[in-house]
Image (cartoon, helix red, strand yellow):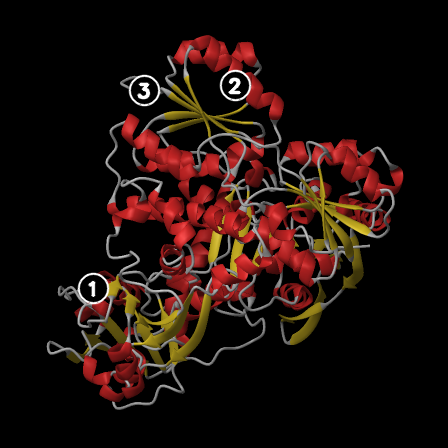
């Protein structure tokens, strides 16, 4: 292949987007077609992917294939989009082009859940609708907007629907056309976790969930589990039978076709996924024979698993019980640095992610089972199963318990992957037989505190090792140093040490005085080349050794945080831009009831006074200010700099259009903020609207679609704006969209010095409207 764009992906699933991301990562140019504008918005914008939100018929496909001299077409449309798939197949046949169906991995859902009383399967949507007619109570419809009309044909069903759709314009319009009320629409991007599904079920008093038989990537397992645990029924529309390749198989094919050298990390991950798909298939085939054979399969191999913190580093700091466990271990797993010095009875593997470890344990289980071993061997010598020669029947025996030790750095309770693995193992109890034990270790923080001759129970402890928030990370670091006398910090390496040193220097006289900050650097703690030394911020810039670092930062003049609005108008940089006065500002902030670690919108930022006041309430509050006036944007930026606020970000543009516009390659800051908001929309707790430009209804509807649990505060001064707000509140109440409406008029006076007298001068009265979105009837 030598033309620029010779690959086309018709994408309608998460796997299609993942495949595009794989091609982008390997700098392979390709074309992507999605059905909706929102589908285009969530695709990554870059020079390697041309993305179009357009539905093509067969003839349009043929024209596009010929025009671009396409060589390979990947069909990743939704399994239920039969007509589209048929058109793609016909077009590729007529053009003699390679066609690949990218399918979701088979999961044998029906066999797995066929005996559960809460789960009902249907061959078609019409069958499902007929059954729903005989039920009562709210229905959570998660099948998307395309087939919504089929459920709305019956008024009894339509009036009970809570519809979960993508937050795109097209989806919302379909809901409107189908007669679905705004307060019964959940417009949000998935996939959804178990906890989120449980939240929706409880919040909307759901009695039945309706879903298509999707896959793990689409969060299908979490839908089922949340329904069962919430004691509601789930109606599942069966997936059409399909042939094709899994995501991993398509990646392997394209890599060979395009002569792409996969990185070791990519190859390992792909092999693991292929292996897991095969294992799950084998498991499903075995367990569908008889209950006895299923139980026998799970009990062929037992594991005695110990999850343990290895301590600060050197072997002499490992607790004695763990030393005994390591000595008795058949298998040792963990990062290479953790396991290098130990020799188990059978083998050790550098696996530390839950997926890798569970895949490995499953492999042992199946290789010890004679029937499954035979099936594995039939896959051929190139199979992922047969590449690791140490895993054969001579290494592992039936009816035996193997002792497995998984090692983690430091202590298992301190920024450790231990409990992620524990939770993942618990979910595999139907496929793996094991006993579990957790052992602690001496963390690097405890060790560092002893080296600094100080306590750690009264210190702030945080880690930016693999956890740095690209938008708000600097704020977290500086705020913790400002308000804590003692801060211990785990960092990723010398670059982080330099970064923190520079942050402290730049924050001098804004957050604190740099002269009050004393830093102790811990390098390769517990190892022979250990270094522990005190220094100043500028000394951090000189650190050059690669290795493991821990910082202890002491602020001798740490500030006391004031948990209330406190800024005077005179503290702000002013211009001709209107500003919400301090008395009103303080009332607004209190009415919004901002929560720790929440995201707050300030719409119509003006001088930024509301944004900055909110940001200073709590170091973990994250503020996005929307402002269209260029002069106001620059003034807000000056005030952000003036107050040293790293947790306020300005988005220039008209709200809500700026959130719905197509990403602009030249505006990376807005794109980054927009992606952050969409990803974290469930954490948006409140919004202040200080300027509407006559677009208040659009603003409220968008905010509702983004997160329908928000609290909104609006201020108005003119009679026209007051009337507009009153009218929209009335309409929103009638449509059952909002609740807890509170309306206040604030009139106040300030004392002014006039000659020898102090006189009251009245300020303009201001109306303050506050309400919450109503997330259910």
Q: Are marks 3 and 2 in contact (CB under 8 Å)?
A: no
Q: Earlier in the sequence, mark 2 or mark 1?
A: 2
- Above or below residue 543? Residue 284 is above
Q: Which residue lies at the image location 34% right of the left edge and 26% below the top edge?
A: 29
Badge 2: how crowded within 10 Å, few (<14), some, or many (20+)?
Answer: many
List the residue tagged with mark 3: 4
Q: Residue at x 28, y 71 (%)?
A: 330
**Farthest-out residue, left:** 529
Return the residue nearer the eye: 638 or 398: 398
- Looking at the rendering, in which quadrant would you find the C terminus? bottom right
User: Considering the numbered disc 1 on the image, is that residue within a helix, a strand or a loop?
Assistant: helix
Pointer 3 local density, CA inside 10 Å: few below 14, some 14–19, many at least 20: some
Depth-wise, is mark 1 or mark 3 nearer the camera?
3
Residue 494, numbered label? 1
- The residue nearer to you, when weighing 37 against 509, is 37
Residue at image x 53%, y 77%? 562
- Report the Cα–Cα distance between label 1 and label 3: 40 Å
On screen, 54 above or below 674? above
* Residue 603 visible in the displayed image: no
């Amino acid at each position: 292949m030598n033309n620029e764009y010779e690959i086309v992906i018709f994408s309608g699933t998460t796997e299609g987007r993942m495949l595009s991301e794989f091609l982008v990562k390997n700098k392979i140019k390709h074309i992507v077609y999605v059905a909706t504008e929102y589908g285009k918005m969530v695709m990554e914008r870059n020079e390697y992917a041309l993305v179009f939100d357009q539905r093509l018929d067969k003839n349009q496909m043929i024209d596009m294939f010929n025009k671009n001299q396409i060589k390979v077409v990947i069909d990743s449309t939704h399994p239920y989009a039969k007509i589209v798939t048929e058109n793609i197949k016909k077009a590729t046949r007529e053009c003699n082009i390679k066609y690949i169906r990218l399918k979701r991995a088979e999961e044998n859902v029906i066999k797995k859940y066929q005996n559960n009383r809460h789960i009902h399967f249907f061959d078609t949507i019409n069958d499902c609708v007929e059954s729903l007619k005989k039920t009562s109570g709210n229905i959570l419809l998660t099948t998307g907007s395309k087939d919504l009309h089929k459920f709305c044909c019956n008024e009894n069903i339509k009036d009970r629907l809570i519809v979960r759709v993508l937050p795109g314009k097209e989806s919302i319009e379909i809901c409107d056309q189908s007669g679905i009320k705004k307060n019964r629409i959940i417009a949000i991007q998935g996939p959804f976790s178990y906890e989120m599904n449980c939240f929706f079920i409880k919040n909307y008093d759901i009695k039945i969930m309706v879903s298509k038989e999707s896959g793990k990537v689409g969060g299908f397992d979490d839908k089922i589990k949340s329904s069962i645990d919430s004691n509601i029924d789930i109606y599942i529309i069966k997936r059409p039978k399909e042939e094709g390749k899994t995501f991993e198989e398509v990646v392997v094919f394209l890599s060979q076709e395009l002569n792409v050298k996969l990185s070791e990390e990519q190859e390992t991950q792909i092999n693991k996924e292929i292996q897991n798909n095969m294992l799950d298939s084998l498991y499903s085939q075995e367990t569908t024979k008889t209950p006895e054979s299923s139980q026998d399969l799970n009990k062929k191999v037992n594991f005695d698993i110990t999850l343990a913190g290895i301590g600060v580093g050197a072997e002499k700091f490992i607790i004695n019980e763990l030393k005994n466990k390591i000595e008795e271990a058949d298998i040792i797993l963990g990062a290479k640095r953790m396991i290098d010095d130990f020799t188990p009875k059978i083998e050790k593997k550098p696996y530390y992610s839950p997926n890798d470890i569970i895949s490995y344990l499953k492999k042992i289980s199946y290789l010890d089972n004679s029937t499954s071993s035979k099936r594995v061997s039939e896959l051929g010598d190139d199979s992922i199963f047969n590449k690791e020669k140490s895993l054969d029947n001579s290494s592992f025996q039936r009816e035996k318990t193997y002792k497995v030790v998984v090692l983690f750095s430091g202590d298992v309770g301190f920024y450790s992957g231990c409990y992620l693995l524990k939770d993942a193992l618990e979910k595999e109890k139907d496929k793996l037989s094991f006993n579990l034990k957790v052992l602690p270790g001496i963390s690097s923080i405890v060790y560092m505190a002893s080296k600094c001759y100080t306590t750690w129970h009264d210190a702030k402890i945080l880690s930016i090792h693999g956890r740095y928030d690209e938008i708000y990370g600097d704020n977290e670091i500086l705020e913790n140093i400002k308000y804590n006398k003692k801060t211990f910090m785990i960092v990723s390496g010398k670059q982080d040490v330099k970064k923190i040193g520079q942050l402290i220097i730049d924050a001098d006289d804004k957050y604190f005085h740099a002269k009050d900050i004393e830093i102790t650097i811990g390098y390769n703690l517990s190892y022979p080349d250990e270094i522990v030394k005190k220094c100043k911020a500028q000394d951090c810039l000189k650190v050059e050794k690669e290795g493991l670092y821990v910082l202890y930062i002491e602020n001798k003049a740490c500030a006391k945080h004031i948990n209330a609005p406190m800024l005077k108008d005179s503290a702000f940089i002013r211009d001709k831009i209107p500003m919400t006065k301090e008395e009103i500002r303080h009332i607004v902030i209190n009415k919004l009831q901002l929560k720790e670690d929440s995201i707050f919108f300030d719409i119509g930022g003006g001088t930024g006074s509301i944004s900055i006041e909110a940001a200073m309430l709590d170091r973990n509050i994250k503020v996005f200010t929307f402002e269209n006036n260029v002069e106001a944007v620059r003034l807000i930026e000056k005030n952000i700099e003036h107050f040293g606020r790293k947790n306020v970000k300005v988005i220039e543009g008209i709200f809500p259009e700026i959130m719905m516009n197509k990403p602009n390659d030249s505006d990376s800051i807005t794109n980054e903020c927009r992606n952050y908001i969409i990803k974290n929309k469930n954490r948006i707790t409140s919004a202040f609207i200080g300027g509407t430009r006559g677009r208040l209804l659009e603003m409220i509807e968008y905010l509702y679609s983004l997160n329908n649990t928000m609290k909104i505060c609006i201020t108005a001064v003119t009679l026209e704006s007051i009337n507009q707000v009153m009218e929209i509140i009335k309409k929103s109440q009638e449509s059952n969209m909002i609740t807890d409406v509170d309306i206040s008029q604030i009139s106040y006076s300030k004392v002014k010095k006039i000659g020898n007298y102090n006189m009251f001068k009245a300020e303009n009265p201001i109306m303050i409207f506050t309400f919450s979105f109503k997330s259910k009837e």
